[in-house]
Each structure stands twice: as structure tokens, then as C-alpha cells.
Amino acid sequence: MRIVFMGTPDFAVPSLKLLLEQQYNVVAVVTQPDRPKGRKKTLTPPPVKEAALSFNLPVLQPERMRNADAVAAIAELKPDLIVTAAYGQILPKSLLDIPRLGCINVHGSLLPKYRGGAPIQRSIINGESSTGVTIMYMAEGLDTGDMISVVELPITDEDTSGTMFDKLSLAGAELLRETLPSIVSGEAKAIPQQHDQATYAPNLTREDELIHWTKTAREIFNQVRGLSPMAGAFTYLNGEVFKIWSCAESESQTSNKSAAPGAVLAADSQGIHVQTGDGVLLLKEIQPAGKRVMNAAEWLKGARLETGTLLGSEVRNDG
């Protein structure tokens, strides 16, 4: 049996390695093109490409999968099955129709909830208590295909997008191991999704990263976790971007209803206590503009942050 694997980020690497460990015949790997990364904009290959090359697998990197030449290149490989995991592009019907066993996707959510490109981040941002992985047959719509198998995992308060990416990528690979034999034998049961219960998880934007202090402490806590360690949530301090990488609902500082949301109530050895729309948030790990990520208490040793300073305004507090 000939398999083409399609994936891009770290999330997809365990699934690719699982196929190889189980001695499936992966004839090629398709991933996104190399992209500039970091301050120096160094052209960097996707993690899946690096993994594929380490196993001496052929790699294809079409800019657009809907391009006829890209589809033709995959058709020439004569795949019996296409396996995708966080590839990053919607596949055209002309591609979906190529393999005799169809195309399956390892998706990081409990479908039909959180269809789209950022299901893990948005499940945390929205305060979900659990998420999971769904293996599904691919259809023309956005994550609308019939489901084959599902595994559910809890989301704890200690989890971030980073920890859940790691957990779900491993869970997805294990689910793939359990599911593939039934797909190969033709015994897999396709379960239609309940489309009226679908929710969506579009890719994150800069607006998603901006903290609105009128939200509750719990909501902002979830936002920060959902954006770490990728983009990070941010606010403004004296007109400059001030990133928040780690925080908690404050247990030692009581809410001050007369204080404006975003006002600093205290700055001590625990960190920075900030009034929100409901409750107080303790900022524990921060990154001032132009500086490294650091412990908030460490930063306070050399920084001046007065009680009443207002976070969230692009205008300097000193006018």
C-alpha cells in the first residue's frame, strides 16, 4: 500500500514517524514551502520536512495545493491513501479523489467543534475543560468529513497551547496506529458529523492577541494560556507593547471596584496585580518591549511601576 503524508508543523511529526515505525510504505511527504523565520528572517524548513529528510523520504513543497501541477505530481505517486495532519491548506476535490482508500485527516479537536486552523489555541482561549483528536475522512468543506475515531483529553489550568500541542500530537499518532488497520481493510465505520453543532476555530489574528482588560480575570488567564508559547498575548505599557506569557488569578489582592480595568493595584515579589472587569490578574512572566522574557518580580527590581499605572492604552501614562 502506498501512502502520501501531508503535514507541516511539529504537531504532525509523531504521526509521520508512527507510519514509518509501523512500516507503512510512505512514498512521499508533502509540506508547506520553507518560510522566513526569526528576526533575521532566515529561510527555515517546516518540522515535517526536517523529519522527512532524516528518513530520506522525497519531499514536495507546492505553494498552492489547488494548482493543477501540484495535484498532478501527487497523482503520479499513485497513492492508495493520503494521510494529513495540520497540513495548512484545503485540499481540492481533484486531489481527494485520487487515492482508492480516500484521504484521512488527524484533526486536533473533538469534531464537529472547532473546525479550522487553530482548534487547540481556541479551545483553551474559550475555557474548554477538554479537547481531543478526531480522525476523519476528508471532504470538500472545512473539516466536514465523516469521522472514523476520536480520543478525548482533559485541559488543566496548567496547560498552555504548547503543552496541549505536545499531548494531542502524541495522542493523534496513537489514534492513527489504532485506526489505520480498519481503514486499510475497508472495515472503518464512517460516522457523519452533526453539522448543526459545528463551531469554528479560524487562524489567530493580531486582535486575538490584544488583551481587553474589561474581560474577567479568568477569560484573560485563558487567553494568555491559549497564546503561549506561540504569539503571546499583549497589552500596552507607556505606549509600548508589553507581552504577558504567564499569569494567574490573584489570590492575595482583592478587587478594587473603583479602579479602572487595566489598573495596576500592586507590584510585589509575586508579580504585577492588575484589575480586570471582574477579579484581579497576577502577571507572572512578562516581556517588555525590546527585552527578553522574564519573571515579573525580577523585572520589578529594576523597573518603576507605580500603583494606578494603566495597562492597555497606546498612549503614554505620563502624557
Image (spheres, rainbow, N blue to C red):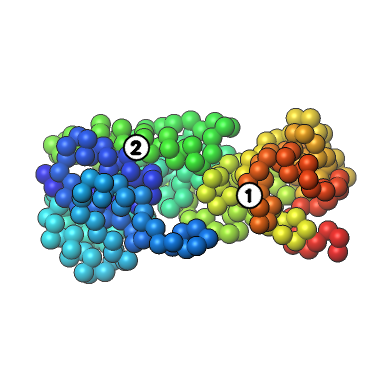
**Residue farthest toward the bottom in the current orientation of the protein:** 68
**Dot 1: element:** loop
Identify the residue under disc 1. Answer: 292
The residue lying at 70 percent from left, 47 percent from top is: 215
In the picture, the quarter occupied by the N terminus is top left
Gap between marks 1 and 2 measured at Cα: 34 Å
The foreground one among 104 and 22 is 22
Residue 60 appears anywhere in the view: yes
Identify the residue under disc 2. Answer: 172
The answer to whether marks 1 and 2 mark residues whose Cβ atoms lie closer than 8 Å is no
* Residue 274 left/right relative to 98: right
Answer with the quarter of the image where residue 113 lies: top left
In the picture, the quarter occupied by the C terminus is bottom right
The foreground one among 145 and 203 is 203
* Residue 270 left/right relative to 15: right
Residue 52 x/y as whole percent: 26, 49
Residue 135 appears anywhere in the view: no
Residue 18 x/y as whole percent: 26, 37
Above or below, 2 relative to 218: below
The residue lying at 81 percent from left, 33 percent from top is: 253
The residue lying at 20 percent from left, 34 percent from top is: 22
The residue lying at 74 percent from left, 38 percent from top is: 297
Question: Given the image, on which type of amino acid does mark 1 rest?
Answer: Arg
**Dot 1 alpha-carbon crowd within 10 angstroms: few under 14, some 14 to 19, many 20 or more:** few
Question: Given the image, on which type of amino acid does mark 2 rest?
Answer: Gly
